[in-house]
Image: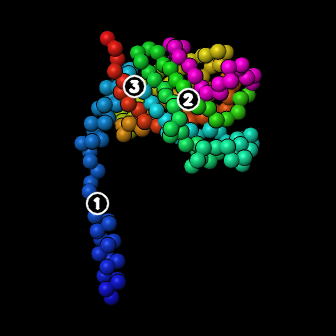
């Protein structure tokens, strides 16, 4: 009987939670609005989600992926990466896991790297979900990237990258403000 009473009490205590802190949510949504309006933010990703192919499965089976990773979800914690929006310029250095569809450059760098003014750049806000979608295209060294950023009010983000030369990949991370030099 004591055992059953203990279980009932423990269940009651666990189910009693505090309501969501709507103030913190509202504050982070305002911070996100300000970052997007100022066009001054940076995303650091902690996970890469490549398109799973037979080649990537072979890499996964060989044990070459970082600790805590699978072929569909690669841990980037500790790896340098960023996507930065400053005014009308964007820049990125994102480690790439996947397959190239066409020729290989001679610089031995398989990362997704670009810097400059994108050829297209659109921002839209889903008022109901309070999230932003930013789409742009940018070219770097004979390769064109089509990028979709999704910025959520809790300051999490996704980066979807489609390339003319590689299989697509998505990155999950966090967005933060950067100071714009005046």
- Whether the residues at callouts 1 and 3 have beta carbons within 8 Å, the answer is no
When asked about the image quadrant of residue 154, the answer is top left
Cα–Cα span, label 3 and label 2: 16 Å
Q: Secondary structure at mark 3?
A: strand
Q: Which residues are magenta?
A: 102-121
Find residue 138 and report its horizontal and vertical position in percent: 56, 18
Nearer to us of marks 1 and 3 is 3
Crowdedness near tag 2: few (<14), some (14–19) or many (≥20) residues, C-alpha within 10 Å = many
Image disc number at residue 17:
1
Image depth: mark 2 or mark 1 in front: 2
Residue at image coords 38%, 21%: 40
CA gap between label 2 and label 1 equals 39 Å
Identify residue for label 2.
94
Q: Counting other residues with Cα less than 10 Å from the Cα at mark 3, is it few (<14), some (14-19), or many (20 or more)?
A: many
On the rendered image, what quadrant is the C terminus found in?
A: top left
**Contact (CB < 8 A) between labels 3 and 2?**
no
How many numbered callouts? 3
Of marks 2 and 1, which one's residue comes earlier in the chain?
1
Is residue 108 one of those drawn in magenta? yes
Residue 107 on the magenta segment: yes
87 is higher (above) or lower (below) than 161: above
Left or right, residue 78 beside residue 167: left
User: 87 above or below 132?
Assistant: above
| x, y percent for residue 118 | 52, 15
Look at mark 3 in the image and give the residue it sits on. Answer: 41
Q: Determine which quarter of the picture holds residue 147.
A: top right
Q: Residue at x 51, y 31 (%)?
A: 80
SS under mark 2: strand
């Amino acid at each position: 009987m004591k055992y059953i009473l203990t279980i009932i009490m423990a269940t009651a205590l666990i189910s009693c939670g505090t309501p969501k802190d709507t103030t913190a949510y509202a504050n982070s949504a305002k911070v996100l609005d300000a970052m997007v309006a100022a066009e001054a933010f940076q995303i650091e990703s902690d996970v890469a989600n490549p398109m799973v192919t037979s080649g990537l499965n072979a890499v996964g089976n060989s044990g070459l992926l970082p600790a805590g990773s699978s072929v569909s979800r690669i841990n980037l914690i500790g790896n340098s990466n960023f996507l930065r929006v400053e005014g009308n310029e964007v820049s990125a250095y994102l480690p790439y896991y996947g397959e190239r569809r066409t020729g290989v450059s001679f610089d031995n760098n398989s990362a997704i790297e670009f810097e400059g003014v994108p050829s297209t750049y659109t921002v839209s806000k889903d008022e109901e979900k309070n999230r932003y979608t930013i789409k742009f295209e940018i070219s770097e060294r004979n390769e064109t990237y089509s990028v979709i950023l999704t910025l959520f009010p809790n300051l999490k983000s996704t980066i979807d990258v489609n390339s003319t030369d590689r299989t697509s990949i998505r990155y999950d991370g966090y967005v933060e403000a950067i100071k714009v030099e005046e």
